[in-house]
Amino acid sequence: MSTTLEVQSPDSQAPGGVLVDRTPFCLRLPRVIPAFVALIGGLFWSYSYQRLHHTDLWGHLAYGRIICETSSLPATEPLMPLAEGVPLVDTAWLAQVLGYRVMAQWGPAGVQFLHAATIAACLALVAGGLYRRTHSFLFSVLGLGLFETLNWFQFQIVRPQMGGLVCFTLLTSLLTTRRWHKLHWVAIPTTLAIWANLHGSFIVGLVLLGCATIGRGVDVWRRTNRVSSMFRDRHARRLLLTTELAAAATLLNPYGLRLYAEVLSFSGNQNLQDLIEWNSLNFRSMQGQLAAGTALALAIVYRLSPRRVSAGELLALVVLGAAGMWSARMLIWWTPLAVACFVLHAHAAWRRFHPLVNFQPPVRSGKWAVVTVGLVWICFAWTPFGLHLLHGKTIDLKRCVSAHTPVAATAWLREHPPTGQVFNTYEWGDYLLWQGPPHLKIFVDSQAHLVPREVWRDYMAVISVMSGWNDNFDRYGVQTIIIDKAERGALIAKLKDDTHWKRRYEDSLAVIFTRQTATTTPEKPHP
């Protein structure tokens, strides 16, 4: 006898030969959920195989290792000898500890899984917010595609900033709910408290809350034409109080108010001006062109959309957009808002010409819950982390890191531990700290803002082969040099011609030189 699965209420009577869906209603799901899970799960699976770059990830893991081994936060810079004594306010200590614990327990596969999970969480929050407000799967997928495209470059790099992005998208989702729930009073301050310990970008969350509060006041003033109405509006008062509670919650960190001073002064550090990622947004780059195209598309849909434009969303778009233009690294905070505003107003413009007739809530069924669980399991089981947990399979480190990671050169250093000061390129300092021989005295790492200005100028003079560049090796007592061949060809050529240095190791990525003669006592740079 053939049977079919029919969704009915528990009280309905099933005709003969028809199966009744006896799944509790709270566990039933609409079919759109497994569709979203399949889409986001595919991206999650792809990112779980994302190779770990050679940049600041390894430095953050090294800081996490020190915190876990000493059970305390270092008061001064602990990893760069030339920055000894420089005060350290570790704005990402919680993310560093979490990353180190995952790495120590499950290896690189665990870190890849953690990175993929943060991206999937952001995508799920974005998709859920868009679908909740449009009831359109296609427009929600359009938003996901735009969000992924705009952040593709940022998603390639594993760093604590991703934890901040999860908090940002969660905060955005809470602020855009149609009704204010009692849960908001707890959820928003808690999100900001966790964010303040994960990454210094928590300031962006307070900016978003401030824009929402000011924007609500402006909307009320425009509607009533009375300034006094701004202070009597219930929702405006709620937003103001929530912002104050969130600001107070961020003080639940090991540094208190010092955290604010560190975050607000960070961008003014002169060393950052020499780093491309902290430069202003370049509209000749793909990232800049995508951002400009999105801004143009936003202007078009705003013109066509019948949906009311709130002052809060415009204020947030302008403020965070200006921050993204000032520094390309800040663009990641503008994109979730830009995507949400574009999709909501594009959907409203579409409905203006294609009205939605007799919208019916999607049918919920137990079978879609089963399909969803199956998809989640498949996406997890086929990741390197899932294979490690379920089958004990381990992946060699070389297969987990990017092609530009100096794995072989670092292994050579472990076999031939250098004595004295090492000169290294900025991009490799973090990996050398993590994987190199114990107590390796690197020159600089990704924490450029902690490097004394004098040391940073001398570093830039060496890698740029400026006048007097080779005198800096004597000044700091450098005994070993490890540099990349891709960007430092001129410096390598000079060192090969210098009789004071001997080439000891070379591969397709790196060259290592050691000193042939004794040096004078190195000078102690001023912090």
Image (cartoon, helix red, strand yellow):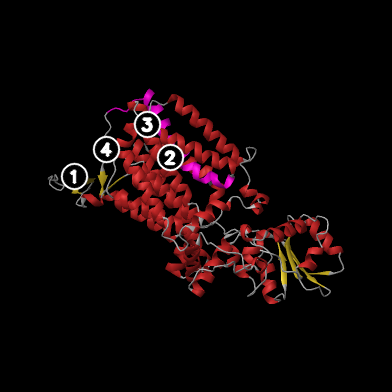
Q: CA distance from mark 3 to mark 1?
A: 45 Å
> Looking at the image, is mark 4 or mark 3 earlier in the sequence?
3
The residue shown at (45%, 56%) is 196
> Looking at the image, is mark 4 or mark 1 earlier in the sequence?
1
The residue shown at (18%, 46%) is 18
Say which residue label 4 marks.
361
Q: CA distance from mark 4 to mark 1?
A: 15 Å
Say which residue label 3 marks.
219
Say which residue label 2 marks.
211
Task: Tell which of 125 and 317 is nearer to you.
Answer: 317
Name the main secondary structure of what is drawn in magenta: helix
Three-letter amino acid code at the position of disc 3: Asp
Q: Is residue 499 left or right of residue 329?
A: right
> Looking at the image, is mark 2 or mark 1 earlier in the sequence?
1
Is residue 477 positioned above or below 191 on the image?
below
Q: CA distance from mark 4 to mark 3?
A: 31 Å
Whether residues under marks 4 and 3 lie with C-beta atoms below 8 angstroms apart, the answer is no
Whether residues under marks 2 and 1 lie with C-beta atoms below 8 angstroms apart, the answer is no
- Disc 3 residue crowd, few under 14, some 14–19, many 20+, Cα 10 Å: some
- The answer to whether any part of residue 514 appears in the image is yes
Three-letter amino acid code at the position of disc 2: Cys
| Mark linked to residue 8 | 1
Q: CA distance from mark 2 to mark 3?
A: 12 Å
Mark 2 or mark 1: which is in front? 2
> Looking at the image, is mark 3 or mark 1 earlier in the sequence?
1
Q: Position of residue 141 (x, y in %)?
A: 43, 40
Give the structural element (helix, strand or loop) at label 1: loop
Region rendered in magenta: 328-357
Three-letter amino acid code at the position of disc 4: Pro
> Looking at the image, is mark 2 or mark 3 earlier in the sequence?
2
